[in-house]
Image (cartoon, rainbow, N blue to C red):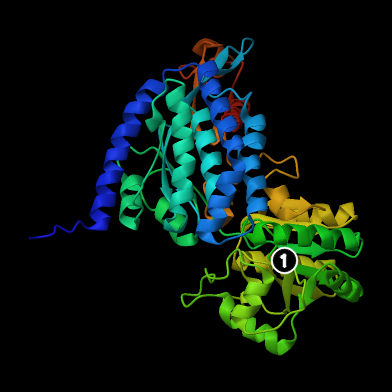
Amino acid sequence: MTVEVFDRDLLSIQEARNLVQRASAAHEIYRALEQSEVDRAVAAVAAACEAEAVRLAKMANEETGFGRWPDKVLKNLFASRHVYNHIKDMKTVGIIREDKVQRFFEVGVPVGLVTALIPSTNPTSTTIFKALISLKAGCAVIFSPHPGARNCILETVAIIRGVLNGLGLPADLVTSLTNPTKEGTDTLMRHPRMNLILATGGNAMVHAAYSSGTPAIGVGPGNGPAYIEKSADIPLAVKRIMDSKTFDNGTICASEQSIVTETSIRKEVMDEVGRQGGYFLPPGDSERLERILMGPGGTMNARLVGRTADYIAKAAGITIPAGTRVILGQETRVGEKFPYSREKLMPVLGFYVEDNWEKACLKCIEILSLEGAGHTMTIHSQDEKVIREFGLKKPVSRLIVNAPAALAAIGAASALAPSLTLGCGAIGHNSTSDNVGPLNLINIRRVAYGLKELDELKAGLPDENVSAASNPAISGDAFDLLVRKVMERLGY
């Protein structure tokens, strides 16, 4: 008896094509709804996801091994309750703005079908977030899960589909690959009926999204330094950094990746870090850990992502004090071959010391230019002049001041728009620097009434049929001067 073998990549490609057809049919129905009907769906989905925050957090933690499930509960609540409260009153479909004086109005037009790539570091919260902003924008979304977080992502999708079905809406507004492969994801991204890609993940994934030929919103890696300036409240600054770096074991890409401080406060900062559970590795142990922070391909070692300090120390074959929350390696160098200067989604920090704030400023720029340009950095200072100087010069889209970066950058501990997709702008090779939300998933049709006739626009301009010689009022140099002034007005 012959047993048929089906290639996994081919099955994934076919599933992707089927999902596009189903999502397209669902969107044809959804796109006709009014704002109030869209808002009703978004409210119901947010409530259902909030109710399942604990269960989904535990699923994500068990499946991936990353982070801490209580912290993932907070991320799920942020993605559902906090994001919903921010977007619920937004106008996204139909007439979203009108000016009766200037006589124009604007219409929100959903981009249509969205492919959403989901990472394993924040799987359920990112799925909730991208589903909510897609539905709020009047779009249909197809998820491509990271294979390492497939089950918890599919369960999140199932909850959302159940809500939509209960409302009498097409469940296929929210679907997912059940057999995620690179080939299936590529089929989704390149499908001629796909309208937009929301890519959250590693450099290779984001590059593939931007190379697909489909409009994409991708986000680059984070590698944000935290600068402790000499005027800072040092115990509070250290607390904020430690809280942020240990939240879900450092899996939020906006979390601090290194500390930069000044010579004059070096001892005070190091002593405070030690009091709050940080441990500075001696040179030999620092080198041992350095050797395993990055994998064979020069990218972050996935085995260490989201793990505890104890787990990481054991993996490196080193001993750290009981109760250590964050491991620190003292460093002076910056570069691809120096892992403490790179992104580390785990409770590990590089530690740099510079003579003054000007040199610290340059060191932060050097770190960001290596990796994380356009993303996020933090400054702890009471000196508004220094803060503003950093705000003017740092190559980031978010400068966080006196706050834990991981939670402030996503808008949980700051006034920034709540988002789990943080754009890095042109300097980070991204299409936006926004904390991405529903308004990034709509186009705007502008309807403008005429305010002037051509005759009014031409008033005061010289008549091409009248020469200087035949018009005694305008002749010679005066005519030339008038022509030059007109040309300047027109921008020539």
Dot 1, crowdedness within 10 Å: few (<14), some or many (≥20)?
A: many
Q: In x, y percent, where is residue 464?
A: 47, 20
Q: Is residue 381 left or right of residue 291?
A: right
Quadrant occupied by the N terminus: bottom left
Q: Kindly tell me whether residue 420 is visible in this rendering.
A: no
Quadrant of res 317? bottom right
The residue that disc 1 covers is 364
Q: In x, y percent, where is residue 119?
A: 50, 54
Number of numbered callouts drawn: 1
Q: Above or below — where is 388 with respect to 483? A: below
Quadrant of res 342? bottom right
Residue located 65% across and 55% down the image = 254
Quadrant occupied by the C terminus: top right
Asked which secondary structure carries label 1, the reply is helix
491 and 123: which one is in front?
A: 123
Residue located 52% across and 24% down the image = 41
Q: In x, y percent, where is residue 318?
A: 67, 84
144 and 422: which one is in front?
A: 144
Q: Is residue 70 left or right of residue 352?
A: left
Quadrant of res 478? top right
Q: Residue furthest front?
A: 1
Q: Amino acid at mark 1?
A: Cys
Q: Above or below — where is 314 with respect to 417? A: below
Q: Above or below — where is 487 with respect to 418? A: above
Q: Residue furthest bottom?
A: 284
Q: Kindly tell me whether residue 79 is visible in this rendering.
A: yes
Residue located 49% across and 30% down the image = 135
Q: In x, y percent, where is residue 359?
A: 79, 71
Q: Above or below — where is 78 with respect to 377? A: above
359 and 219: which one is in front?
A: 219
Residue located 14% across and 57% down the image = 4
